Image (cartoon, helix red, strand yellow):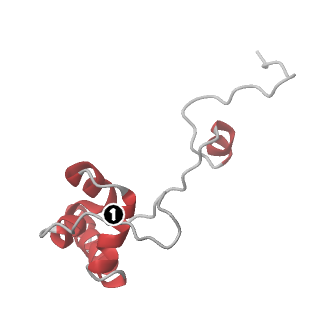
Amino acid sequence: MPRAGTRVSYRPCPVDFRETFIRVGWDGIEAEIGAHKRNIRVWIEQCGGDELRQARRQYLEDKYRAESGDPDRGVPGRRPLLKSRAARHVAGFRRGPASPVAGEEEAP
């Protein structure tokens, strides 16, 4: 953590960051370039911010439309990240039968 009043120097933005971000997204940048999320956030803002995010969104829409063959199909929504097993079950993301509630027995 830097001392108060000092600035943190970030890695310089890679030359091909914009194209790579549009093609692989945030997780791909982390894996491909090996950058920390703080660096990625700064680089996104340096390369256009909202305009860059919109270009990524458009790339995904075009990709999904090409894969599906349906010109009216958009990008499917992302499922919410639910860490609790119970929350995933309630939301309908079931892998198998639900485990019994504490204190209750399973019905035969």
**Which class describes the residues within 10 Å of circle 1: few (<14), some (14-19), or many (20+)?**
some
The residue indicated by pointer 1 is: 39
x then y, percent, for residue 96: 57, 29
Q: Residue visible at 27% across and 65% down? A: 64
Would you identify the image quadrant in which residue 55 lies? bottom left
Q: Is residue 102 above or below residue 65?
A: above
x then y, percent, for residue 106: 78, 19
x then y, percent, for residue 94: 58, 38
* SS for callout 1: helix
Q: Residue visible at 49% across and 73% down? A: 5
**Which quarter of the rendered picture does the C terminus lie within?**
top right
For residue 26, side relative to residue 102 (left or right): left
Q: Is residue 48 above or below residue 19?
A: below
In the orientation shown, which residue stands out farthest toward the top?
108
- Residue 74 vs residue 83, the one in the foreground: 83
For residue 37, side relative to residue 46 (left or right): right
Q: Residue visible at 34% across and 55% down? A: 36
